[in-house]
Image (spheres, rainbow, N blue to C red):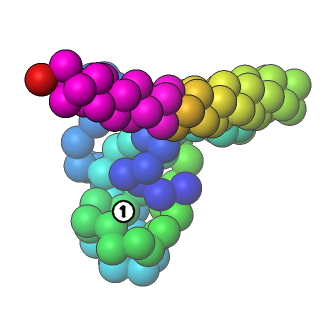
Amino acid sequence: MQANLGTTIDASFCGRVADASITCRLHLAPCMKYVAFEGRDTGRRFYGCAVPQDGIDCGVAQWVDAPWPSILQRCLEKIWEMFHEENCGRVIDHAKYKKELDKVNKQLDTLGDQYS
């Protein structure tokens, strides 16, 4: 899990890790506190890389919370799958709407030119 993608802010769990022994395996830098926001680990707290990401996924340095029960993990995965399907549908609908709107605007411009 990438620390800056799929995470959320939790005011009660944020900032740098006080324990200097918890570091990113790749950068050997002190970690930051994050909360997973997507997938089967939604809501779980973890320590992750604090170095700005350059497309590199350093992964989770250390989980704070134990894994969710398997039934909850499956439910979370299904909910996120449904969310992404719905979101994809909205993107497709938006593209169709934009195409139709462009067509109507061209017709409006043509009618305006003819009226002038």
Q: Is label 1 in a helix, a strand or a loop? A: strand
- The quarter of the rendered structure image containing the C terminus is top left
How many C-alpha atoms fall within 10 Å of the one at disc 1: few (<14), some, or many (≥20)? Answer: many
Point 71% across, 32% down: residue: 85
Of all residues, the one furthest to the left in this rendering is 116
Q: Left or right: where does residue 17 sit relative to residue 59?
A: left
As displayed, is residue 2 above or below residue 105? below
- The quarter of the rendered structure image containing the N terminus is bottom right
Q: Left or right: where does residue 61 sit relative to residue 18?
A: right
Q: Quadrant of residue 77?
A: top right
Residue 108 visible from this viewpoint: yes
Main SS class of the magenta portion in the image = helix
**Residue 109: percent from the left, percent from the top?**
25, 30
As displayed, is residue 45 above or below residue 4? above
Question: In the rendered structure, which segment of residues is drawn in magenta?
Answer: 97-115
* Residue sitting nearer the eye, 99 or 92: 99
Of all residues, the one furthest to the top in this rendering is 115
**Residue 103: percent from the left, percent from the top?**
43, 33
Point 26% across, 67% down: residue: 51
User: Where does label 1 land, which residue?
Assistant: 49
Point 33% across, 67% down: residue: 53
**Residue 42: percent from the left, percent from the top?**
59, 32
Determine if the magenta segment contains residue 114: yes
Q: Left or right: where does residue 101 sit relative to residue 42?
A: left
